[in-house]
Amino acid sequence: MASDADFQPARRLHGWSWLFGLSVGIKQMVLPLIALIFFGTRDNDPGPFGPYLVPTILVALLIRALWQQFTYRYGFGPHGLVIREGLIFRNVRQIEYARIENIDTERGVLHRMLGVAEVRVQTSTGGKPEALISVLDLEAVQEMRAKVFADSKPGEPVVAATSETTLLHLTTSELVRYGLIDNRGMIVVAAGVGLLHESGLLNFDKEWFDSVLQSSSAAGLVALGLMMQIALGAAVLVAGLLAVRILSVVLALVTFHDFKLTRQNGDLRARYGLFTRIALTLRTRRIQAVHQTESLLHRWFERVTLNVDLAGDSGGSDQPDANKSRARWLAPVCTASAAPVLIAAALPSIDLNDPPDWQPLAPQARGRIFRRSAVLAVLLLTGPAIWYLHEGAIVVVLACIPLAWMHAHLYTKHTRWALAPDAVMFRSGWLTRRLTIVPRDRVQTLSIDASPFDRRSRMANIYVDTAGGGAMRAGIRIRYLAADVAESLASALYRTAGV
Amino acid sequence: MQLTQVDPAIIRVWRWHGTFTALILTVLSGGFSLPIPALWPFPPLFVAIAGLTLAWVWPPIAYRHLRFGVDDTGIAIESGVLWRSRVALPRVRIQHTDVSQGPLERRYNIGTLKLYTAGSRHVRIELPGLNHDEALALRDALLAEGRGSGV
């Protein structure tokens, strides 16, 4: 490693880097500055430094950004990417080529105007990117990709630009469908209301209600009569729902504009975005699992959504830097018939031609799910139902029972698992149906657990853990399996894991 | 896979742990006890008796259900009395390992083997109650052949 120690990185950032350093600095300072301006001028006396405060901070930020730009160096050392930051407090980071998993770029409007990109170098460590290089021009990014990925696979010939085949390209009409399926608009509206409420601009208190009720438009509303009021209420509701859906469509069009999934040298690349253009590399040997989601709305449009878990992404949910561990889309939306092709492209080592041998849950599973959901529903609903409906509560509580039976029946009918020679698959749910495929050589650990209830009916639950998914959605968890079936599935997977 | 039990000295460690916990809970329940002079001693007394009984009775039961086995592929650990679980970890998936010892464990010369994986939920798998030397030997045995990328 002596040659590494002597290696001096020589490549510099792009000439406009200070601009982005400055804008990041300003973004970090905006909240403290606003607070300062608000609280600092309470007594209408800006103080002796008042007028100079903001310019001083801006100049300081500019100097810092310029300093960072001129002292930042990167280079391609004999064994890894070398990044040197700072001159007085010097930090030299070395990232081995073989450890680098993804080189992702993100380009906002300003980046695109100047022809540059923000580059994230990720290893399998997970969480934050190993290096954030802001900013490089596109040729430098291309050079970095070529150098890093050529060196990481020794022995393979350097094929810089083999033909790139497009696997999926989302047209505007597809994105409209996605917007209609997706509920993102609702989330944005909820977040907006929450923000306005927090900031005190929106305050639903008694005064607000009184002022609304005593306004002339309220008086006019009273004069309309009951039927008109109901019709008006319904119209407002429909308009609101429509507006949220339109917002979802607009968001989908902006976020996933020109979504393109391509394959080059066996690895997949996704590019999307109208204003902020994102380019992600999905290296197929890092893909740990493929998830297919199909909600009721998906089925109406005959579409599915495909995600992948990538090694190195785990733990993202614990990080405050959550937007950096964005969902790894294989396809935000695609036709149900195109899904198998895309899954095969993401998991090239798996033979998906033979239909999997789907196995049901344990025979007693339906009865247990029924009893469980019925008891849960009755326990939760009885109190509120008696409180609000008095005698009518009996109807609500009794209605739980057929509904619980329906849920148990449909759930067990649609939930199946399959063990293929090279993968384990699980599909579950009846309203929102999910399919997860985990290659057997990606299995991390296997665990079987059984509660006292499970043991009474000779059942067990199995959990197949994989890397890269975050604690909530990773791997496969199958509940209500017969104990001996769970046991043999676990031992079969254990023998082949990591082989 | 042949499953074996850990060092029985762990029972004594768990009994000490249980005793300390019971004493702390007794003091706390004494602090928040009924404000009636005649009834005041009963809640802490109850907590003390129940806690100390549990601290004495539970460890041997938990010990009976804690078993582990090692084979060519990896290690399996079985635990839990009411909620039973069994985790199987192939040795190629071990990222790194720890052998840790608390003051009580040091007194009885036992250690806890901690195995870390790149997984999402079972990131750390613990096997308590191994003889300290045995824990070190097991760690070395697991690491010896487990040279892989781990993902």
Image (cartoon, rainbow, N blue to C red):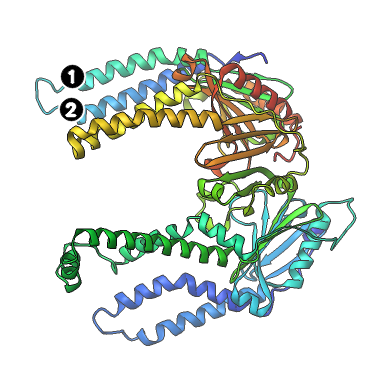
Residue drawn at the location 59% of the way across and 55% of the way down: A128
Residue A459 at x, y percent in the picture: 52, 19
In-image side of B39 versus A295 (left or right): left
Q: Does residue A415 sit above or below A288 in this rendering? A: above
Name which quarter of the figure residue B130 lies in: top right
Residue position for label 1:
B42
Residue A256 at x, y percent in the picture: 60, 63
Crowding around mark 1 (Cα neighbors within 10 Å: few <14, some 14 to 19, many 20+) is some
Farthest residue to the left: give it.
B37
Depth check: A148 or A181 in front? A181
Assign the C terminus of chain A to one quadrant of the image: top right
Q: Is residue A320 visible?
A: yes
- Contact flag, marks 2 and 1 (Cβ < 8 Å): yes
Q: Does residue A111 sit above or below A121 in this rendering? A: below
Q: Chain of mark 2?
A: B
Residue position for label 2:
B33
Q: Earlier in the sequence, mark 2 or mark 1?
A: 2
In what element is the residue under mark 2? loop
